[in-house]
Image (cartoon, rainbow, N blue to C red):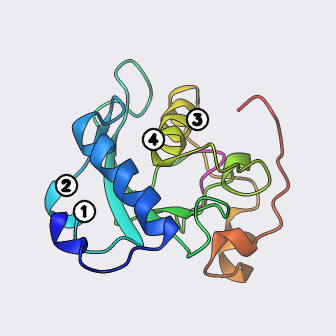
Amino acid sequence: MSHHSRFTCSPAQKRLQKELVSLIKEPPPGVVIDGESVGQSLDLLVLSINGAQGTIYEGEQFQLQFRFGPKYPFDSPEVVFVGTEIPVHPHVYSNGHICLSILTDDWSPALSIFSVCVSIISMLSSCKEKKRPPDDSMYVKTCSKNPKKTKWWYHDEEV
């Protein structure tokens, strides 16, 4: 990552570089980071999440994409599942959008890529039944490409 040093980094990029360095060193359990792809762009990150052992997603692997705006960390990243395997979960739409309050209303600059990954793994791990959200097909037809533009209704607080 040192080749970035001769450019002036924005505060968002400095923060992201720090986060990425520590993520590569010590990723959360179940998260796999491709060190190669990380240095290429600071505003886009794709990492793999493995379904935790003993959960209904055990043995499955999902790709999680983070897109960071210039106001990060004051503004939350856009986080979606991408690729062919989108987890079937009551809070994950078939287009990869995730209904999780820390990604919108409850975001705070104290949160990080690490804490978002941990929250998503925990959301998947606590799930007892694989099913899509009740309004999946309607949402997928009508939503914006950017999940942050969605006015989420958080159906239930326990999941």
**In the rendered view, does 146 fall on the left or right side of 142?**
left
Q: Residues within 10 Å of mark 4 (few under 14, many from 20)?
A: some
The x, y position of residue 3, in whole percent, is: 16, 72
The dot on residue 123 is: 3
> Along the polypeptide, which appears first: circle 3 or circle 2?
2
The residue drawn where x is 62% and y is 52% is: 132
Residue under label 1, please give it.
38
The x, y position of residue 44, in whole percent, is: 39, 71
**In the rendered view, does 5 fall on the left or right side of 139?**
left
Please state, as top left, top right, bottom left or bottom right, where the C terminus lies in the image: top right
Which mark's residue is nearer the viewer, 2 or 1?
1
Question: What's the amino acid at mark 1?
Answer: Val
Residue under label 4, please give it.
114
Viewer-side residue, 77 vs 98? 77
> Along the polypeptide, which appears first: circle 2 or circle 4?
2
Q: Are marks 2 and 1 in contact (CB under 8 Å)?
A: yes
Specify whether residue 108 is in view. Answer: yes
Which mark's residue is nearer the viewer, 3 or 1?
1
Q: Is residue 91 magenta?
A: yes
Q: Quadrant of residue 97?
A: bottom right
Which mark's residue is nearer the viewer, 3 or 2?
2
Element class at badge 3: helix
The residue drawn where x is 39% and y is 49% is: 19
Picture layout, residue 134 above or below residue 130: below
Q: Which residues are magenta?
A: 89-93
Question: What's the amino acid at mark 3?
Answer: Met
